[in-house]
Image (cartoon, rainbow, N blue to C red):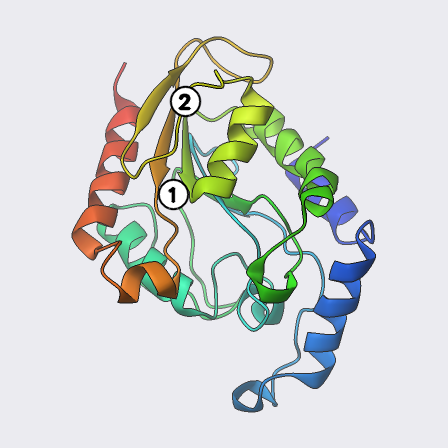
Amino acid sequence: MRLDDLNADLLTCRRCPRLVEWRERVAREKRRAYRDWDYWGRPVPGFGDPAARVLAVGLAPGAHGSNRTGRMFTGDASGDFLYPALHRAGFASRPDSTSRGDGLTLRGLYITAVCRCAPPGNKPAPDEIRNCLPYLRAEIELLRPRVFVALGRIAFDALKSLLGAPAAWTFAHGALYRLTAHWSLNTENWLLCSYHPSRQNTQTGRLTPEMFDDIWTKARQLMIEP
């Protein structure tokens, strides 16, 4: 299977009735500010460099962000905080992401999420997370990244489960763990933790640009160091 094949399969997914109903209703009703948009309203595929050595994992598409634009972390406050940091670290060709056709490219990085459909209240249910994890597992198998960046606790827990990491590992911003050989991995791999770049975290100062820059600087170092 190739990434293109995986994403084609993802676009037909209707495993979670609650999420299907919500993503499609949001796409029909729209937000007033985006009434002229043709909302994506489907599962959102991963985005980035197919030869990436860094895999960033978020939570889920935003109702009027990725569910509108069809690209991960695009069209909402989280993306407005993420992409400038990626540009500063040399992962993104430009500091903004506005639409799927804006010309943005990623170098050495692939962005995905635990859940691919926008959940009500940004809170997917446990069974919805379980339904979606096979897609993340398949991406890991195809990409075989050297560095995993978990954007938030839910992404961290999902990666721990998929990678067979020790239960004792705990989430904290900046925490770094070395992964042993695994079904999908090379001989040395790393799991790096970051607070999610949500509006709640960035506007309260829990996650600052300097803190986020440190994460991507470290990810780049881990990506290239032997």
Left or right: where does residue 216 sit relative to residue 134? left
Q: Position of residue 122 (x, y in %)?
A: 56, 61
Which residue was labeled with disc 1? Answer: 107
Q: Nearer the viewer, mark 1 or mark 2?
A: 2
Q: Is residue 31 positioned above or below 173 on the image?
A: below
Quarter placement of the N terminus: top right
Q: Residue at x 54, y 11 (%)?
A: 182
Q: Residue at x 83, y 58 (%)?
A: 17
Q: Residue at x 33, y 45 (%)?
A: 91
Which residue was labeled with disc 2? Answer: 169
Q: Position of residue 133 (x, y in %)?
A: 67, 36
Q: Residue at x 71, y 40 (%)?
A: 6
Left or right: where does residue 193 sit relative to residue 140? left
Q: Is residue 195 positioned above or below 104 on the image?
A: above
Q: Is residue 115 visible?
A: yes
Mark 1 secondary-structure assignment: loop
Q: In the figure, residue 146 lies in which quadrant?
A: top left
Direction left: furthest residue: 210
Determine contact: label 1, label 2, CB under 8 Å.
no
Q: Is residue 94 visible?
A: no
